[in-house]
Image (cartoon, rainbow, N blue to C red):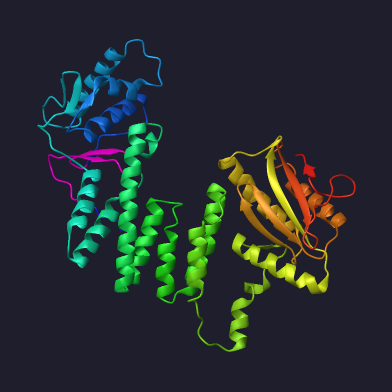
Amino acid sequence: MYAQHPLREGTLYARFLGGFALLWNGKSLTSASKSSETQFSYLMQMLLHYRKEGVSRGRLEEFLFADRDVENVHHALQSVVYNAKRRLRSMGLPEANYIVQSGGVFRWTEEISVESDTEVFARLVQEAGGEEDPDKRLALWLSACGHYRGEFLPNQVAAIWAAQTARRYRQSFCGCVERAAKRLRDREDFETMEQLGLYAARVDPLADWETVTMDALVSRGMYREARQLYDDTVQLYLRREGLRPSKRLVEIFRRLGAQMKHRHKVLDAVQEELNEPDGGSRGGYCCTYPVFRGIYRAVVRLMERGGQSVYLMMCTLMDGETPMEEGPALEALSAQLEDVIGQALRRTDVLTRYGAGQFLVLLVNITLEDCKIVQRRIDRLFAGRDQRVRIQYYDKSVLSGSEAREGADSADGKESAR
């Protein structure tokens, strides 16, 4: 959906949204592989973003050297400016005094024209606000959304000026998406609305834009795809941030769920859709958290009549006495543990990933002593994966809702040291 802006010869293009880049005649001038390159990028970010009003010496020095022990910051700044001019000249820019200093303020030269994605984005948003024709206004909103490639300077979140600017552009983007989605819904252009939701979720992740896509899918009668999107979104939020779905996401799913109606089919065909492919895999049934929650609630109701003993078990990956920190190591061990737990369970047991390095297991028709056996089985299968890691277990009876005691009489709080 991103609208590629045409590049004109003799114009320096600056990209701030989704990451910083400079382009001159189609050639990139930026790289983050060396510290000198980083200083060059930092300098150009401020000069080009504030090129109308300029940047004071003190502000530049604070931005470039605040976290470094520099003996003479004035000399260091002059060195960065000098090297930047040499670099710009070597990359083919025409001869000019690229960075002008006057009265303690640094500015980008007026001799070389500059165009930035933030200016194009802001201009489109402003034009949409003043456009009276609904269709033209929609086109401007969509075009503005397409020029938003992501957060403003995402690598500068610690810089106050960048964080404030990023917040302002994101608010404008959110407004464009919401207004465009409403207009597309009114026009019943659900295909474009779906593409808008997918794009927004990609450039502004973990912001519930999946609700736009879900709304469009349901309106097009694509109920199975809408349900799958919901499950995938919940799983994504849990795995990346350890977050449960937001109230907004749950509410829209409930509201849209009332619209999901299936075509009339014979019972045999319906049952065929419900069955697991090829009879399902061996071991426990692994599902997303929303499905797990539904199964749990159904089991609780069934137990009111059957009286079976069912336990809820939580497994947490620990590094010493604390849960493992998020990162590639945790993600790799979580995937391994998920596979191990699935192997250790019976086909009647249910498993889901609850958060980062954490799993929930529903053990059906089992005793507290049998819970310990399952935990020892998991330990045995997981042994040797990482000697620093251990698994912490907690058990709770589903029927009574009371926690089992720790020690010889229960498995609650049992910890498996690796």
Is residue 370 among the parts visible in the rendering?
yes
Q: In the orientation shown, which residue stands out farthest toward the top?
A: 71
Q: Quadrant of residue 86?
A: top left
Give the residue drawn at x 90%, y 46%. Answer: 408
Q: In the orientation shown, which residue stands out farthest toward the right?
A: 408
Q: Quadrant of residue 286?
A: bottom right
Give the residue drawn at x 19%, y 64%. Answer: 136
Residue 179 magenta-highlighted: no
| Direction from residue 159 to residue 296 in the image, left or right | right
Residue toward you, 60 or 94: 60
| Direction from residue 19 to residue 248 in the image, left or right | right
Is residue 288 among the parts visible in the rendering?
no
Q: Is residue 36 above or below residue 357?
A: above
Q: Is residue 146 above or below residue 66?
A: below
Residue 220 percent across, percent down from the top left: 40, 75
Give the residue drawn at x 40%, y 54%. Answer: 202
From the image, which quarter does the C terminus lie in?
top right
Residue 260 percent across, percent down from the top left: 49, 76
Give the residue drawn at x 90%, y 49%. Answer: 409
Query: The magenta stretch spans which residues?
Result: 6-26
Residue toward you, 213 or 24: 213
Q: Main secondary structure of the magenta part?
A: loop
